[in-house]
Image: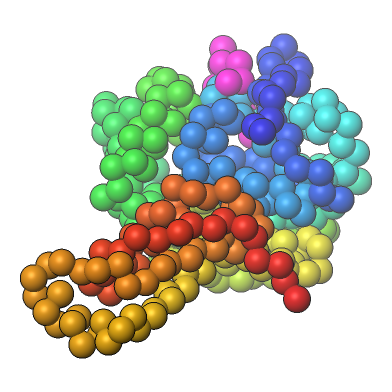
Amino acid sequence: MRPVTKYAKSGELHIAYQVAGRGAIDLVWAPGYISHVEHAWEYPPYANFINRLAAFARVIRFDKRGTGLSDRAVAVPTLEDRMDDVRAVMDAVGCERAALFGENDGGPMCMLFAATYPERTHSLVLYATFARHVAAPDYPWPLPREEREQIVRRIVEKWGEPQVLDFTAPSLREDPQFQQWRATDLRLGASPGAALGLFMMNSAIDIRPMLRSIQKPTLVLHRTGDGVRKVEEGRWLASQIPGARLVELPGVDHLPYVGNTEALVGELEEFLTGMRHHPEPDRVLTTVLFADIVDSTSLWPIAKSTGSVAALSTVRATACSPRSMDLPARSAAREQSVMASLGLVLPFVRDCTPVKSK
């Protein structure tokens, strides 16, 4: 069942949020550039990512002011305004202390919160984020402000189309389902003008002076082939936060719910709980039983050449995943796939009774 969207009051604005899971630790997820807490569930890999986190934590997700289902601000919000939205959401759900998970421009919000409210911060997990949004002489990895602004203005001109997937999700750039979902997600997440305004706000972010004041356990996660925020930014960030641990993950996708998500979630889970859960894969065990009936094997070449294959076998497919007990359609499809790979056209009996572990 999907969580219900509720609202927290932050000043005069309402911040949309959802809570998933009942884990022992509260995990506040500050999203990247644009988000929509309800539409996220429409893309199965995103939903799976949330549920994986919810298996060990109470996951508190929200749309930043000006995006998604949250109120649109009259003026472009400051980083301090958006940081205060974290506090408002935590108060609304009765959370006194939480681990903070910040991706992209959600990262500076979380770092500022950890430095401002250390008593309410359990720990910090930063993914594909930055300390400064645009390049500077002593921070050379992002694009210069003028160049980045030109790119953003071109994106805004075609806002709501499946753009920049070569950078945000290159492994899915040719996937029609993802293209459609992502384009809709952008339209629901912000209007073109709001998207441009958020970029202008992000361009002013520079939290380098306060990094040394963060005194909470910090995990920095970054994919080595990220085309939006270079891994060098993650390395520098980890070197500036006292005691921070850097984990470089293989991959080219910037969005956390795309690519090898289990590697990312596994690191996060182990950091927060001290252990890593390996979810059992969703699989179907297929057994082919063959009986030689009155020298029927000697007739096989003839039967195969004529295309008239007798019913020589029975296939039994058993759903093994504890998360997938009722899978008649999927089992049937996989049975047919196995048969096709063997060159067989056979009747089968399907049994979806779970296999009991010994």
Does 60 appear above or below 280? above
Identify the image quadrant of the N terminus: top right
Does 167 appear above or below 79? below
- Predominant secondary structure in magenta? loop
Give the left or right position of residue 155, taking residue 81 as reference: left
How many marks do you count on the picture? 0
* Residue 299 sits in quarter: bottom left
Residues 2 and 244: in front is 2
- State the image coordinates of residue 117 (x, y, percent, origin top left): 84, 42
Identify the image quadrant of the C terminus: bottom right
Does 192 appear above or below 46? above
- State the image coordinates of residue 152 (x, y, percent, origin top left): 34, 36
- State the image coordinates of residue 121 (x, y, percent, origin top left): 84, 48
Residues 332 and 103: in front is 332
Residues 352 and 71: in front is 352
The structure residue drawn at horizontal position 49% and vertical position 43%, both measured from the top left corner, is 44
The structure residue drawn at horizontal position 43% and vertical position 76%, both measured from the top left corner, is 289
The structure residue drawn at horizontal position 33% and vertical position 35%, both measured from the top left corner, is 180
* Residue 212 sits in quarter: bottom right
Residue sticking out furthest to the left: 306
Q: Is residue 239 magenta?
A: no
Q: Is residue 77 magenta?
A: yes
Evaluate whether residue 130 shows in this view: no
- State the image coordinates of residue 186 (x, y, percent, origin top left): 41, 30
Question: Residues in magenta?
Answer: 69-81
Is the image coloured rainbow, by chain, by secondary structure, or in one colour? rainbow
Give the left or right position of residue 307, taking residue 184 as reference: left
Evaluate whether residue 279 shows in this view: yes
